[in-house]
Image (spheres, rainbow, N blue to C red):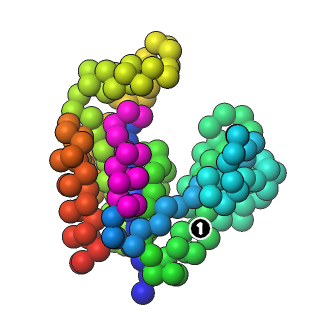
Amino acid sequence: MSGKLFIFSAPSGSGKTTIVRHLLQQDLKLEFSVSATSRAKRGNEIDGKDYYFLSAEDFKQKIANDEFLEWEEVYEGCFYGTLKSEVERIRNKGNNVIFDVDVVGGVNIKKFYQDDALAVFIQPPSIEELENRLRSRNTDSDDVIANRVKKFKFELAFADQFDTVIINDKLEDALEEAENKLQNFINQ
């Protein structure tokens, strides 16, 4: 039996990655979908674990061969995407696939897998709270934060294309809600 798919998308600072990491530690037979990229490895990154590292030429060839569920050229010559073969590798083992992707990628994966996928949009309680979370990280400049807040407004317009929205006001509640939604979807 092929596994099911769980797509998590959210604006930066919504808590999506924290929720996905938590879910991977639960007994839900989840396996993380490793993305492909054409950027160079950083530090101790491992091919096949952190990303599938491809040359820009190889990435473009895979695009031409329709090997991606979704992909994006983030900036000139730097691509990111989800390989169909990665998803099928996980599903063929009988595991469920979990994605941590941007909203456009999430919508595209949902369209491809339809009823086999549950698309979850993680949303902060407000724009103000999102901005506070981004500032508390102390990793971004004011310009970067302003751009992320602007991007949030764009991404929020996609929320109605997801199966469910979890408002991450209190992390413990959001974790429990996410676990319950996944368990219910697995049991369908």
Q: Residue at x 75, y 53 (%)?
A: 54
Quadrant housing the N terminus: bottom left
Q: Which quadrant of the structure image shows residue 182? A: bottom left
Q: Is residue 95 above or below residue 120?
A: below
Q: Position of residue 25 (x, y in %)?
A: 38, 61
Q: Position of residue 120 (x, y in %)?
A: 31, 53
Q: Is residue 160 above or below residue 133?
A: below
Query: In the displayed structure, does residue 11 sit left or right of residue 62?
Result: left
Q: Position of residue 186 (x, y in %)?
A: 29, 74
User: Residue 147: in sight, yes or no?
Assistant: no
SS label for mark 1: helix
Q: Which residue lies most toward the bottom here?
A: 1
Amino acid at circle 1: Glu
Q: Position of residue 110 (x, y in %)?
A: 41, 61
Quadrant housing the C terminus: bottom left
Q: Is residue 28 magenta?
A: no
Q: Which residues are magenta?
A: 12-25
Query: In the displayed structure, does residue 81 sit left or right of residue 120?
Result: right
Query: In the displayed structure, does residue 68 sit left or right of residue 126?
Result: right
User: Residue 137: in sight, yes or no?
Assistant: yes
Q: Residue at x 69, y 45 (%)?
A: 44
Residue at the spot of label 1: 86
Q: Residue at x 72, y 53 (%)?
A: 53
Q: Is residue 15 magenta?
A: yes
Q: Residue at x 54, y 69 (%)?
A: 87
Query: In the displayed structure, does residue 55 sit left or right of residue 139?
Result: right
Depth check, front residue: 59 or 34: 34
